Image: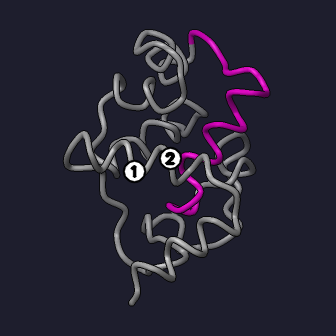
């Protein structure tokens, strides 16, 4: 079976153990939309591609790979986080989901400050 955009997207979703509904929530689209992307019945627009890239950036996802099956780094097949070198994990509670959502929406300087605070 040849690798397609949809199968590559599903690969990253499965690596996190997320449902289509969870990915839809993170990307602010419906579960049906995620399903259509994964099955090749639709393609995301440029704005949604940017959201997908940001969502999976810590897992090594690049748009080159997603669109064209071109890997920038071999480690992206292993789904290893660049910053922690630990496997990516899904939020385990609503509180974690809230923290993660707010963290992602924060400017880079604030993210660094929060991470420094947690290291103490």
Question: Vertically, is 19 above or below 89?
Answer: above
**Residue 102: mark:** 2
Give percent across and percent down for residue 90: 30, 51
Give percent across and percent down for residue 26: 47, 33
Q: Which residue is mark 1?
A: 99
Part of the protein shown in magenta: 41-60
Pointers 2 and 1 in contact (CB under 8 A)? yes
Give percent across and percent down for residue 49: 70, 33
Q: Residue at x 60, y 74 (%)?
A: 112
Does dot 1 land on a helix, a strand or a loop? helix
Q: Residue furthest bottom?
A: 120
Give the class, few, some or many, for how many residues have Cα within 10 Å of label 1's Cα (few <14, many ≥20). few
Question: Vertically, is 89 above or below 49?
Answer: below
81 to the left or right of 49: left
Q: Residue at x 46, y 80 (%)?
A: 117
- The quarter of the displayed image where residue 43 is located: top right
Does dot 2 land on a helix, a strand or a loop? helix
Give percent across and percent down for residue 78: 43, 68
Q: Residue furthest right?
A: 46
114 to the left or right of 44: left
| Real-space CA distance between mark 2 and mark 1, rounded to the nearest whole angstrom | 5 Å
Q: Residue at x 70, y 69 (%)?
A: 109
Q: What secondary structure characterizes most of the magenta part? A: helix
């Amino acid at each position: 079976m040849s690798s397609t955009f949809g199968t590559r997207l599903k690969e990253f979703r499965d690596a996190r153990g997320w449902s289509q509904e969870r990915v839809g929530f993170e990307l602010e689209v419906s579960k049906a939309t995620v399903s259509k992307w994964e099955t090749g019945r639709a393609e995301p627009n440029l704005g949604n591609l940017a959201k997908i890239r940001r969502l999976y950036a810590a897992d090594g996802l690049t748009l080159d790979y997603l669109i064209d099956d071109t890997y920038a780094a071999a480690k992206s097949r292993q789904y290893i986080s660049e910053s922690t070198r630990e496997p990516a994990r899904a939020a385990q509670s609503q509180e974690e989901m809230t923290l993660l959502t707010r963290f992602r929406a924060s400017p880079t300087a604030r993210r660094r400050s929060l991470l420094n605070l947690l290291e103490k």
